[in-house]
Each structure stands twice: as structure tokens, then as C-alpha cells.
Image (cartoon, rainbow, N blue to C red):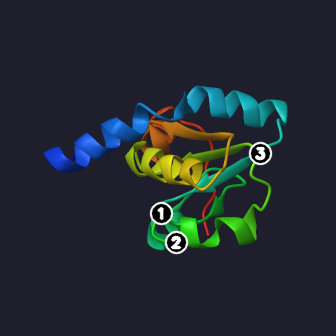
Amino acid sequence: MAKQHTPRFLEIVSQAKANVRECDVHEVKQRLDRGDQFHLVDVREQSEFAAGRLPGALHLGKGVIERDIEKTIAETTAEIILYCGGGYRSALAAHNLQLMGYTNVISMDGGWSGWRNAGYPTEEA
């Protein structure tokens, strides 16, 4: 069943999406297949990450990413692709990382749901 998001949440997501770069799941798959170098970061909750994730993704949940990003990815010009369940939390996280001075952050629209619906490979704990 699709989640029903509240109007205020959708409004802040819309504002964030207007200010961040986005890509789709197919672009990320192509880049992984080519061996492009970038940080792939899952911003979902720990339980979601443990249940399954994109191959090679590291976990920095949306609740702690601002606190922990500098310890994990110190270089503010590093390319970072963020994903969540559908592309909303990742857009919010991307926006906040930009506010922190990260200049090459991308939110993956479609997120985990789009990746799985496309039949792309996943990893489990």
C-alpha cells in the first residue's frame, strides 16, 4: 500500500526538490555498471537498510546524516548519491548537505521502491 504523505511534508519535500539535483534509478544502475566512482548513501532507517539495500551502499540514516557526514565523507566536493524509500527523505537530506557546504549531492528519485520495481540487484544483511 502506498504511503499517504501529509500536505506539510509534501510541501517541504517540494521545496527541497526544487533546490537539489536528482537522478533516477536507471541512471544509478548504469553508473554502478560502468564502475563510476561516487558515494552511494542509504538514508533510510537502520531496520530498512538491514532488510535490503542497493549493492555497495553505506548507511547514514536521515536522522543522523548531518551529524555524521563529515566523519564518513569529509570531502565536500565528493559526489554523493542519496536514496531512501521513494525519493522524499533523500531530497531533504540532500538539501541539508548542500546547506552544510557539500556541492555535489544528488537525490535518487524513486528510491528503494523504484530500484526494486525495476528488478535491479539488491544486498541483504
Circles 3 and 2: CB distance less than 8 Å? no
Which mark is drawn over residue 77? 3
Residue occupied by mark 2: 64
Q: Label 1 amino acid?
A: Lys
Which mark is drawn over residue 120? none
Residue 17 falls in image quadrant: top left
Report x, y in % for residue 94: 53, 47
Report x, y in % for residue 113: 42, 43
Would you say residue 8 is visible in this rendering? Answer: yes
Circles 1 and 2: CB distance less than 8 Å? yes
Q: Residue placed at 65% from the left, 65% from the top?
A: 69
Residue occupied by mark 1: 62
Would you say residue 5 is visible in this rendering? Answer: no
Q: Residues within 10 Å of mark 1 (few under 14, many from 20)?
A: many
Report x, y in % for residue 19: 47, 34
Q: Residues within 10 Å of mark 2 (few under 14, many from 20)?
A: few
Give the mark toward the camera: 3 or 1: 3
Report x, y in % for residue 21: 55, 32
Q: Label 3 amino acid?
A: Thr
Q: Residue placed at 62% from the left, 70% from the top?
A: 125
Q: Label 2 amino acid?
A: Val
Q: Residue placed at 53% from the left, 38% from the top?
A: 108
Give the mark toward the camera: 3 or 2: 3
* Front in this rendered view, residue 72 or 86: 72
